[in-house]
Amino acid sequence: MLQKRDLTKIQIMKPIFSFFTALLLFTSVQAQVTLDYYLPDDVEYNDDIPTPMEVLSQEVGEWHLRHDQLVQYMYAIAESSDRVTITEIGRSHENRAMLSLIFTSPENHARLEEIRERHLQLGDPEVSDDLDVSNMPVVVQLSYGVHGNEPSGSNSSLLVAYHLAAAEGEEIDELLDNAIILIDPSLNPDGMARFAHWANMHKSLNTLVTDPESREYTEVWPRGRTNHYWFDLNRDWMLVQHPESEGRVAKFQEWKPNILTDYHEMGSNATYFFQPGIPSRTNPLTPDRNQALTANIAEYHAEELDKIQSLYYSKESFDDFYYGKGSTYPDVQGSIGILFEQASSRGHAQETIHGVLDFPFTILNQFTTAKSTLKAALELRVELLEHYRLFYKEAVREASRSTIKGYVFGETADQARTFHLAELINRHNIEIYELAESISANGETFQAGRAFIVPTDQPQYKFITALFERRTEFTDSLFYDVSTWTMPYAFNLPFAELSNRQFNGNLLGERFDGTMESTGEVIGGRTRYAYAFEWDEYYAPRALYRLLDAGAKAKVATLPFSGVTANGERSFDFGTIMVPMGIQDDKMEIHEIIAQIAEEDNIKVYALNTGLSSRGIDLGSNNFSNLVKPSVAVIGGSGTNSNEVGEMWHLLDQRYHMPLTILDKSGLGGVDFSRYTVLIMTGWNYSDLSSNTVDAIKDWVREGGVLLTMKQAVQWANRQELADVEFVRRNGNGDDEETETRPYIKQGADQGAQVIGGSIFNAKLDLTHPLGYGFNDDDLTVFRNSTTFMEKGENPYSTPLYYTDDPLASGYISDENKETIAGTAAIVVSRFGGGKVIAMTDNPNFRAFWYGTNKLFANAIFFGRNIRGSSGN
Ligand SMILES: [Zn+2]
C-alpha cells in the first residue's frame, strides 16, 4: 500500500525490456525497490526462509546496509535453513564480527569435514592421483566488500544468501549437491561501517539528490575504502598484517576454493568489469591454464549480463600480477581468482554519462555475476578440480627440477623481525622449520635456532618462489600495483638460496608452529649502577618508550663502549640505550619496567656494575646523549595520504605502544606545536597551509623541533626553505632537445613506464649516524614508490642513507629513472635554527610489512633531536 508521502515514488520493474531499463537508469525520483526486482522470475522461494525485508524492515538497496544489519540477516538465514552454517572467523580492529557462511545440501553438510579433507588431498600430489574428481563437489568462495566504500558487493550478499537458502527446484538442488559455496559477506567491516554511515546520513528521504557534487557522493578523508588504520585490505592477502586478513586467509587455506570472487566498484561513469584482465600483466608464476579458465568463466558472466542489458568489458584494465590482491592470491595456489568491478553509485543514485545510476542497479549486477559464477563452477566443475590437481603436480615437478632446494633467513641480533617473516610465511600453509645446524651461505652465517629454513620441495613451491624471488625483467612496463615484494628485503634479513650441495634434511629442525618464545632476559639481575640494552631488536623502541613514559632517565650511546656484565666483558654498539640508576626518581619502578621489557619486548638487558669501560667511552661520558620522551604528531586530513598516515599510526599504536596525534590539516590554525617533539608530514599537498601555520611550524623547528618530511612533503619543506635539498631532474628532458614525435596511442604506456609503482633498491647506510642506530649492516634495501630524487647534501655528514650506483634490487624501473636514481640521497638532514628537518624520499613503513626499515622511522622519532651539525639555513 502506498501511503500519501509515497506518491512520488515509482515501482521499479525488472528490466526485461529496454523501456524499463531506460526508466531505471533515468529516474531521479526515489525508487521503491522490491525483492522481485532482483530475483529470477522462474524460481520459487521457500516461505520459511526470511527475506531481508522480514528481518530488517527495509529492502535491499533502499539504504546502505550497516554491518550490524548484515550480521543480523546472515544469522537469521543460518538459523532458518539446513543448507547453511555460519562461523565467526575473527574480529576487525573495531571489534566487528568477520563471518564465513557455507551453503551446500544438507547431505553434504552432514559429511562436510570428509568432503573438505578429500578436496585438500587433490592438492597433495602424493595422493591426488587416487582421487576421482567426477563425484567431488566444486568449492567456490564469494568474497565481498574488501573496500568499504564499494558497497554493492556486500549489499548483494543478502540476495545471494537468500537465493541459496530459499530457492526451490532442480537447478538449486543440483548446485547444492555439487558445490560447497563459502560466502564472506564483508571483508572490511570497519570500512563498510564508515561508508554506510556517510551515505545514509546524507540521503534525502523523499527525493533522491543525484547531483554528483552533493556531499553524499564526496566522502571526506580518509573515506571508507580502507580498514581502521586506513590500510587497503586488498593488498594484504599475502602480507596478512591485519586481523581482517588472518581469518580470511586461514579460511582460504582450510578450503582451497576452486574459484574465489572479489567484488569491487570503480568510477561512476564506467560500466562493469570482469576478469580476465590485461593478459601481458599476469604474473609469470601463474599458469596459462588459469587465464584460460578465467576466460571460460567470463562467458557465463557475459551471458547473464546480456540478459539484463548491462554494459560490461574485460581484458582492458586491471591485472593479475601482485599476489596480495584477493583476485590474484588464489591464482598461485591452483585456484581461479576473479575480480568484478561495478560502476559505483557511491550513494543512493548519481548522475553519470549513462544517465542516473542507482544503487539497486549496481546490486543487481553483482548478484547477477554471483549467479553466473556459480553456474560456471557447476558446469566447469571437473575442469576446475583437474586444474587444482594439475597445478600442484606441476608445482612439485618444477620444484624437483629447481636448482634452489631451500631458502634460509634470519638475523641473530633481531629475533622478533626474523619471527615475523616466519609468521607471514606460515600463514600460507607453507612448511617452514627452525634451522637445526648453523650454516654459511651467500656470504652470511645463519645460526641454528636463530634462523628459519623453507624447503622448496613442497606443494606451495610456487607461492614460496613468489615470496623470495628477485625479478628485474618484465614483459610489460605498467603495473596496477607494486612490481616486487621480495620478503627478506622487506624484513631486511640476511638470506640465502640453498643449492643441492648446500641443502640437506639435517638442516630442518622443528616445524615452526607460529609462536615465538621471548629470548629477552635481564642478564645479571638487578643492578645499583646502570642497565644497558642494544637497539637491534625490533621492539627496542617500544621498550624505550615504556621507560621514558614512566619518567625514567635514559641515554643513547653515540659511540661504542664495553661493559662488564654477568656474562663477562661485552661490547655495546652505537645506539645502545643506557639507564643509569643513581639518578632515577623511582628506582623500584624502573627495576620493574626493566624486567617487563625483557619479557614482553624481547630485550636482552645487561646489568652493569661500574661506569668504567675498558674500551670506548665510560658511562658518564658526554657521548651518551640524553633522551626525552617523544611526543609525536602527524598532519593528516584532506590533501594528505591516508595510507601513509595510517601506516605510521598502526606502527606506533600496534607495535610500539605509543600515542600518535593526528592533526587535521584544515585545523592547524590554533595548534600549539610546542607540546610535540616531532612533527611528521608525508605525501601529498601542503600548498594550502596558511602563512600563519607555516610560520608557527618554522618557529617550532627553530626552537628545537624535529620535522620529518617524507616524499612530496620534502618538496614543500624545501620551498619553505626549511629543508636544504637539491632535487635531481630526470635525464633527457633538456629544453634544447628536439621533441621526438610518438604515436598518439603510445601516450598512456609511455607515461606509465616512468612511474615507480613500487620497487626495491639497494642503499648504503651510515651506521654511525643516529638514524642508522640498530642496524648491523650498511647495505640496506629500501622500498620506493615515488619519483622524488634528491642530491646528496652539500654537507658531507648530512646524508646518512643514499642509493648505490646500480641500486635496483628487484622490481621495475625505466632506464631513464634507473640512470637518474643512481647515487642519489634517500635521506638528507638539514639544520633549521635549533631544530632539524629530516627529508626522506621513501616510505619506511610500507603496508606494515616493511619491518626492515621501520627503525629508520623510529630513529627519527627518538634520536632526531640528537643529530649534531648537518647543513643549515
Ligand atoms: Zn575496490
Image (tube, rainbow, N blue to C red):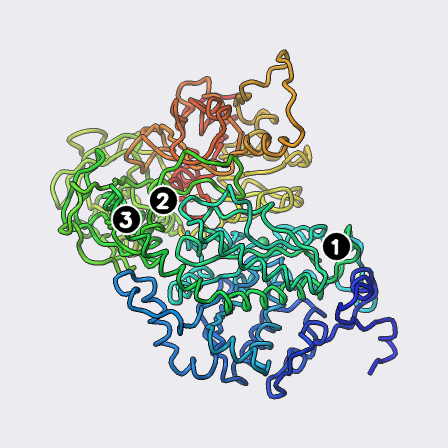
Graded by Cα atoms within 10 Å as few (under 14), some (14 to 19) or many (20 or more), the crowding at tag 2 reads: many
Q: Which mark is residue 215?
A: 1
- Dot 3: element: helix
Gap in angstroms between the C-alphas marked 2 and 3 = 19 Å
Task: Please state which of the two labelled residues, at mark 1 or mark 2, is closer to the viewer.
Answer: 2
Q: Name the residue under label 3.
A: 399
516 or 591: nearer the eye?
516
Q: To which quarter of the image does residue 193 belong? A: bottom right
Do we see residue 710 in this rendering? no
> Mark 2 highlights which residue?
487
Q: Which of 121 and 250 is in front in this view?
A: 121
Residue at coordinates 81% horizontally, 61% vertically from top-left?
Answer: 22
Looking at the rendered structure, the kind of residue marked 1 is Arg
Q: Residue furthest bottom?
A: 48
The residue type indicated by label 2 comes to: Met
Q: What residue type is labelled 3?
A: Ala
- Element assignment for label 1: helix
